[in-house]
Image (cartoon, rainbow, N blue to C red):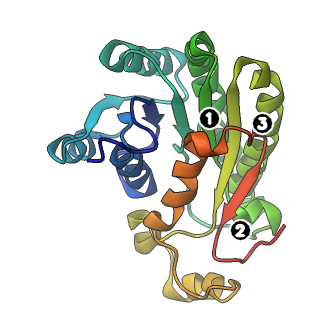
């Protein structure tokens, strides 16, 4: 791992990091020198072990982002293990295994579950992390939204609505936390070929999405990491309240 990286001596939490894009986020931050809490409701030990075996610093923590006590314990683990918290990447969300359906066919409890994980989960994590960052008068919060917010998407109304809420939440949080030195930005990926997407999306649907891009190829988890590291690094210290769409040019705004 890089001992002189852009995130050297920083402490980061990445939620939803046991697999897919979240795991890649955790590896990317560790490669830039950050100590990383690899958090997930699933077992994230393998990702943390990979980082540690590569010379980085990581700790796997089981966390349900909809449970305030679980989230507080996650932040406490960052303080106890690594001495504080500088970076929070709110990646945990329902998407890859969500079945596409017309909005009339989305059950009320399915809607509520989507909002609990994708929206309230981010709220719970920021609520727990901000006081710890405030002590240092510095922090980077990156909330993960979706490019679908800016173009609309059929058959996923609950998901797209939840990600629109993330954009709005991030802007308001940026206002509230600016005087504390905490920057809040949003990374909005397009369709990324994570394991769950490969397993649950048809090739035709993927290629239809690729066809809307200026750069016409599939997106990989690694394609998101340069932007993520930028938003977590000192290079973006004068950037807050912004949305960066990383989708090969399907959305231009």
Position of 61 with respect to 93 (left or right) is left
Q: In the rendered structure, which disc, 3 or 2, sits on the residue that comes first in sequence?
A: 2
Secondary structure at numbered mark 3:
helix
**Whether residue 173 can be seen here:** yes
Residue 155, label in figure: 2
Q: How far is mark 1 from mark 2, CA to CA?
A: 30 Å
Q: Residue 235: x percent and y percent?
A: 61, 45
Q: In this view, does 231 lie above or below 177?
A: below
Looking at the image, residue 52 lies above or below residue 20: above
- Return the residue nearer the eye: 145 or 173: 173
Please, which residue is most extreme toward the front here?
Answer: 4
Q: Residues within 10 Å of mark 3 (few under 14, many from 20)?
A: some
* Disc with the residue nearer the chain's start (1 vs 2): 1
Identify residue for label 1. 141
Q: Which residue is labeled 3 in the image? A: 169
Q: Could you tell which of marks 1 and 3 lies nearer the N-terminus?
A: 1
Most distant residue in the left direction: 53
Closer to the observer: label 1 or label 2?
1
- Residue 88 quadrant: top right
In space, the residues marked 1 and 3 are separated at their CA atoms by 12 Å
Q: Position of residue 122 (x, y in %)?
A: 62, 33
Residue 37 visible in the displayed image: no
Residue 238 placement: quadrant: top right
């Amino acid at each position: 791992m890089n001992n002189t990286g852009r995130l050297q001596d920083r402490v980061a939490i990445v939620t939803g990091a046991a697999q897919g894009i979240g795991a890649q986020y955790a590896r990317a931050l560790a490669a830039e020198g950050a100590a990383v809490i690899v958090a997930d409701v699933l077992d994230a030990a393998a990702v943390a072990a990979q980082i540690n075996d590569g010379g980085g610093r990581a700790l796997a923590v089981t966390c349900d982002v909809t449970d305030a006590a679980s989230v507080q314990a996650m932040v406490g683990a960052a303080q106890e293990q690594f001495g504080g918290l500088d970076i929070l990447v709110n990646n945990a969300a329902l998407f890859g295994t969500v079945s596409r359906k017309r909005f009339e066919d989305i059950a009320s409890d399915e809607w509520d579950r989507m909002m609990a994980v994708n929206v309230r989960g981010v709220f719970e994590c920021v609520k727990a992390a901000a006081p710890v960052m405030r002590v240092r008068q510095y922090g980077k919060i990156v909330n993960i939204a979706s490019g679908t917010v800016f173009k609309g998407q059929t058959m996923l109304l609950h998901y797209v609505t939840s990600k629109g809420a993330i954009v709005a939440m991030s802007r308001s949080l940026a206002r509230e936390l600016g005087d504390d030195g905490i920057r809040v930005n949003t990374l909005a990926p397009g369709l990324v070929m994570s394991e769950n997407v490969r397993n649950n999306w048809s090739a035709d649907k993927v290629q239809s999405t690729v066809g809307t891009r200026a750069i016409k190829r599939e997106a990989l988890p690694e394609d998101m990491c340069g932007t993520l590291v930028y938003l977590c690094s000192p290079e973006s210290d004068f950037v807050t309240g912004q949305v960066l769409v990383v989708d090969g040019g399907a959305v231009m705004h």
